[in-house]
């Protein structure tokens, strides 16, 4: 969605403040926005001091909780910790276990396994947990809405201390103590804590009571990770806690942090909120979303070097799967919103699909909310007739309140203003959609028009230097309510383009301006259709990039606006040049060498992971030269290649076509189906399979139908581009198998005919054909 740019005007800073920040009016303006107008207040904001932390006793029920925990420690009672499976819940659990164990307590813990229990407290699992002899139950990052479970526990003679930060219910649960920052006023210094921050406050109070305050501060790094990962507002004590935690991580990093940074090629000195938010947190979250997060509690507290190494490697694999699954949900949702545009016009976007993996719905919903400037709810079907899912919001819309307005339709729900989880019977979805949209309209919370992007300052590229970056970085850690500074520069052009990432989902550019200044830029999760082809204005943040020991500054794309409309005409007097390298000993190597300094892209299926310029049909972008290292499997795919790229020359470097027998095709497809079942929760994308096998989507689909008819797989769910299936070994439906085989043979014969035709075209004929296709499109 197009965004409206608004450059801030914070006003003239006081002389005292301006002198303190060495005359940097941008830094002074940022501080003024946060009510910081004197050097004394700036010192407190920029330079953390643990003495400035608010007394945890200001949280309601803290005194009762401390006394009960001290009693449990003194009398050797078994303390049970019930956490949550996301990073905030993992770190909150680790803080409680680490500190209580350090005080000599007997501690056990449980994190819900998402696939079986979802968020919150499952009563059957709780009963099993209590049977282990728990005498005091402490919840963290959950519990505030779990009245039934807490009533049951208290009824069994087990005291409960709830620590949570989620939205308060109308009636607090019947626990001994309910420690929740939302019980304070919104402007209270402790009012924006996350689950891990709340758990830290409890342990700080307990450790102080026991004369062991330093023990609590040994866990403040975990609190910082949870706060940042949960996108808690980084203001007042939450910000101070994050600052102190980052300081401790840099000075005394835990072994698991060092291991994960080493795997990513980053030194500990580069550890900041960006590293936590985009490197550590997603990997930890992947375990909770896709598997069982319980082993991570020990990992977070540091375990054996071998376990740390093995766990870090496993998290890397899980995170890759998490990214793939999230991309599938996100793209499927985008495609549906393009087809049914009325769904994107409602005050809240609500979509459901049986193929979507529940553990990534919140991540995909967050991306869609940002794209469409709408709160977004994504749901998946289950076999018990319930829809379960996640919601993500935008600034100004409390999504949990909105969901609560339709509580009559729901089975469960809970969350905070920007994120929530919910479940409801499938038949209630239409009424839920009506009620929540009606409530948002009645509250005047309907978003219309483009979202506003606030820009801190307009810069020339020459102003982006290390001294300026250091001044900006002094305002970190950045996060919610303390966002990274956004800048804009005008009249830029892209000098070079290079894809990044396993799936070419990111791009690295070099920018230049009219004065000859240049600056590298990275665009994470780029929208290839929006890559500028002429002059444009750029909104961006500034970061550091380290490569082979060299640290450079780079821009990070936030938004772009075209400065000129350029229309490309393909005229017969400027035909595209075709150069044939197929007779060379090494066609691809020769073709690349012939490109010289001109930009090039290689169409190759499957794409080669060791060459960033090798791309399949779904990851193409413009370049001067397109090298065909594979034959397109159909005229439709060739047309797709032409319309998605803007090359002037085509280099032919593909090997001779070979005919693939049906048996070989099915064997290859079986391997990918097995991988999908074992590694990707049974989810497979037709587009991915077509690209990796250099086949047409219809052929892949026919192959899947053959496996289904043969009784080798069970199709659990399907939409336009996704299948979800499981392996089985049932009797074949012979008639359906024969039909699928006949269709497969027809489609494969069609492909071979096209490959022979394409290979026989002269350079002149191919050039004319490409010109015709481009003019028609």
Image: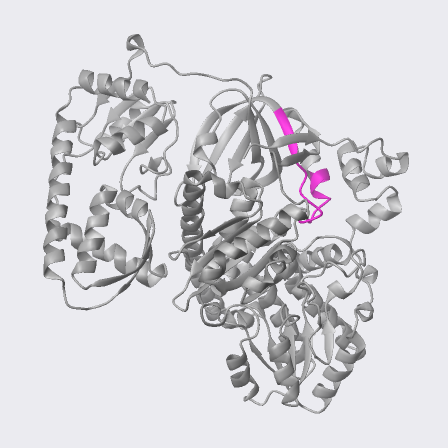
In reply to whether residue 640 is colored magenta, the answer given is: no
Residue stretch in magenta? 470-489
The image quadrant of residue 248 is: bottom right
The image quadrant of residue 144 is: bottom right
Q: Is residue 155 above or below residue 298?
A: below
Q: Residue furthest bottom?
A: 75
- Residue 139 position, x and y percent, is 64, 74
Viewer-proximal residue, 280 or 550? 280
Q: Is residue 161 above or below residue 12?
A: below
Residue that appears at 78% across and 48% down: 46
Viewer-proximal residue, 359 or 310? 359
Viewer-proximal residue, 661 or 242? 661
- Residue 611 position, x and y percent, is 35, 39
- Residue 425 position, x and y percent, is 47, 64
Relative to 27, is 523 on the left or the right? left
Viewer-proximal residue, 732 or 65? 732
Judge whether residue 224 can be spotted in this image.
yes
Does the magenta stretch mainly form a helix, a strand or a loop?
A: loop
- Residue 14 position, x and y percent, is 89, 35
Quarter of the image with the N terminus is: top right
Relative to 504, is 221 on the left or the right? right
Judge whether residue 266 can be spotted in this image.
no
Q: Residue furthest top?
A: 573
């Amino acid at each position: 969605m197009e965004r409206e740019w608004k450059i801030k005007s914070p006003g003239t800073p006081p002389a005292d403040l301006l002198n303190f920040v060495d005359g940097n009016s941008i830094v002074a303006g940022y501080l003024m926005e946060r009510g910081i107008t004197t050097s004394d207040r700036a010192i407190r904001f920029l330079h953390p001091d643990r003495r400035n932390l608010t007394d945890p006793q200001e949280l309601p029920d803290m005194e009762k909780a401390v006394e009960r925990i001290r009693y449990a420690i003194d009398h050797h009672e078994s303390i049970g910790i019930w956490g949550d499976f996301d990073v905030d819940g993992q770190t909150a659990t680790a803080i409680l276990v680490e500190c209580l164990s350090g005080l000599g307590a007997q501690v056990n813990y449980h994190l819900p396994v998402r696939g079986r229990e979802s968020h919150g407290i499952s009563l059957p699992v709780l009963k099993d947990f209590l049977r282990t002899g728990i005498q005091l139950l402490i919840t963290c990052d959950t519990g505030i809405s779990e009245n039934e479970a807490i009533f049951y526990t208290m009824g069994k003679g087990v005291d409960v201390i709830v620590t949570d930060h989620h939205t308060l219910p109308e009636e607090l649960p019947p626990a001994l103590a309910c420690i929740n920052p939302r019980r304070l006023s919104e402007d209270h210094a402790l009012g924006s804590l996350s689950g891990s921050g709340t758990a830290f406050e409890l342990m700080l109070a307990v450790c102080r009571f026991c004369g062991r305050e330093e023990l609590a501060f040994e866990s403040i790094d975990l609190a910082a990770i949870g706060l940042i990962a949960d996108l808690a507002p980084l203001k007042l004590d939450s910000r101070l806690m994050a600052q102190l935690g980052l300081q401790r991580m840099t000075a005394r990093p835990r072994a698991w942090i060092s291991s994960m940074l080493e795997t990513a090629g980053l030194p500990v000195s580069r550890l900041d909120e960006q590293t936590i938010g985009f490197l550590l947190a997603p990997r930890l979250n992947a375990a909770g979303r896709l598997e069982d997060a319980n082993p991570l509690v020990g990992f977070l507290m540091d375990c054996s070097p071998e376990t740390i190494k093995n766990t870090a490697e496993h998290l890397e694999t899980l995170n890759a799967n998490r990214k793939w699954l999230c991309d599938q949900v996100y793209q499927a949702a985008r495609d549906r919103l393009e087809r049914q545009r009325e769904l994107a016009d409602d005050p809240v976007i609500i979509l459901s699909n049986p193929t979507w993996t529940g553990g990534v719905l919140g991540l995909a919903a967050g991306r869609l909310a940002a794209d469409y400037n709408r709160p977004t709810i994504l749901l998946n079907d289950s076999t018990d007739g319930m829809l379960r899912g996640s919601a993500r919001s935008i600034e100004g819309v409390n999504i949990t309140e909105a969901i609560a307005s339709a509580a009559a339709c729901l089975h469960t729900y809970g969350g905070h203003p920007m994120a929530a989880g919910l479940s409801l019977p499938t038949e209630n979805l239409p009424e839920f959609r009506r009620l929540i949209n009606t409530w948002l309209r009645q509250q005047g919370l309907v978003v219309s028009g483009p979202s506003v992007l606030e820009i801190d300052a307009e810069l020339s590229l020459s102003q982006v230097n290390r001294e300026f970056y250091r001044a900006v970085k002094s305002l970190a850690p950045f996060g919610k309510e303390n966002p990274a500074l956004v800048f804009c520069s005008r009249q830029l052009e892209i000098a070079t383009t290079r894809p990044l990432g396993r799936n070419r989902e990111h791009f690295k550019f070099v920018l230049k301006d009219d004065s000859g200044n240049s600056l590298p830029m990275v665009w994470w999760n780029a929208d290839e259709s929006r890559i500028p082809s002429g002059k444009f204005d750029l909104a961006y943040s500034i970061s550091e990039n380290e490569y082979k020991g060299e640290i450079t500054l780079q821009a990070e794309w936030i938004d772009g606006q075209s400065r000129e409309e350029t229309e490309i005409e393909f005229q017969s007097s400027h035909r595209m040049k075709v150069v044939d390298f197929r007779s060379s000993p090494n066609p691809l190597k020769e073709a690349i060498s012939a490109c010289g300094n001109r930009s090039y892209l290689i169409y190759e299926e499957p794409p080669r992971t060791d060459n960033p310029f090798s791309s399949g049909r779904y990851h193409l972008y413009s370049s001067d030269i397109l090298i065909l290292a594979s034959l397109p499997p159909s005229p439709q795919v060739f047309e797709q290649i032409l319309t998605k790229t803007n090359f002037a020359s085509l280099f032919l470097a593909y090997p001779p076509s070979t005919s693939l027998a049906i048996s070989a095709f099915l064997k290859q497809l079986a391997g990918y189906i097995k991988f999908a079942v074992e590694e990707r929760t049974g989810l497979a994308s037709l587009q991915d399979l077509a690209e990796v096998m250099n086949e047409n989507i219809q052929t892949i689909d026919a192959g899947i139908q053959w496996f289904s008819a043969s009784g080798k797989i069970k199709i659990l769910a399907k939409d336009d581009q996704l299948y979800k299936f499981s392996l089985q070994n049932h009797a074949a439906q012979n008639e359906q198998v024969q039909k699928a085989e006949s269709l497969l043979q027809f489609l494969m014969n069609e492909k071979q005919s096209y490959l022979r035709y394409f290979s026989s075209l002269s350079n002149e004929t191919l050039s004319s054909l490409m010109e015709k296709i481009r003019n028609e499109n």
